[in-house]
Image (tube, rainbow, N blue to C red):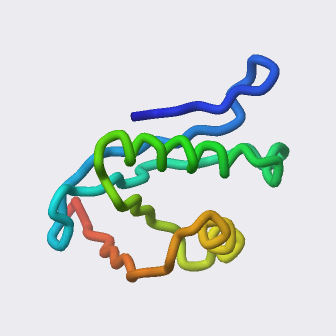
């Protein structure tokens, strides 16, 4: 599902989620694949409204978890997520691989 936020006929934010299954989740969860709000309209409640929309969507699906990843150094984003009820729960690991060898 993708939801966009529009102000004066201009897209100022979006959130994209996918329902997925994972170990430890009996009915699955929503995973936030993409989430952004334009810098010039941040701190105006747009991101909070997008997250609330996703929360309501999860409830409609009978899902009790929403999961997202955030870059380690994005401390302002982390504070925003925590203000919106998210908990820091795990680490995400990645590995760059060479596709030419």
Horizontal side of residue 87 vs 64, given as left or right: right
Where is residue 48? Give x, y as percent: 66, 51
At 51% from the left edge and 68% from the top edge, which residue is drawn?
Answer: 70
Horizontal side of residue 44 vs 70, given as left or right: right
- Total number of numbered labels? 0
Q: If the image is split into quadrants, where does the N terminus sit? A: top left
Where is residue 77? Give x, y as percent: 65, 67
The one of 52 and 32 positioned closer to us in this rendering: 52
At 54% from the left edge and 41% from the top edge, which residue is drawn?
Answer: 53
Horizontal side of residue 36 vs 99, given as left or right: right
Horizontal side of residue 55 vs 41, given as left or right: left
The one of 96 and 10 positioned closer to us in this rendering: 10
Q: If the image is split into quadrants, where does the C terminus sit? A: bottom left
Where is residue 61? Give x, y as percent: 30, 42
Vertical relation: 72 (above or below) 20: below
The one of 17 and 62 positioned closer to us in this rendering: 62
Vertical relation: 83 (above or below) 29: below
At 84% from the left edge and 45% from the top edge, which residue is drawn?
Answer: 40
Where is residue 94? Give x, y as percent: 33, 74
Vertical relation: 78 (above or below) 68: below
């Amino acid at each position: 599902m993708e939801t966009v936020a529009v102000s004066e006929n201009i897209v100022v934010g979006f959130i994209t989620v996918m329902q997925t299954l994972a170990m430890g989740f009996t009915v699955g969860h929503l995973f936030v694949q993409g989430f952004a709000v334009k810098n010039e309209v941040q701190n105006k409640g747009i991101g909070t409204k997008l997250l609330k929309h996703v929360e309501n969507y999860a409830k409609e699906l009978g899902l009790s978890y929403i999961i997202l990843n955030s870059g380690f150094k994005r401390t302002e984003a982390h504070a925003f997520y925590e203000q919106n009820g998210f908990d820091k729960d795990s680490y995400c690991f990645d590995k760059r691989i060479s596709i030419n060898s």
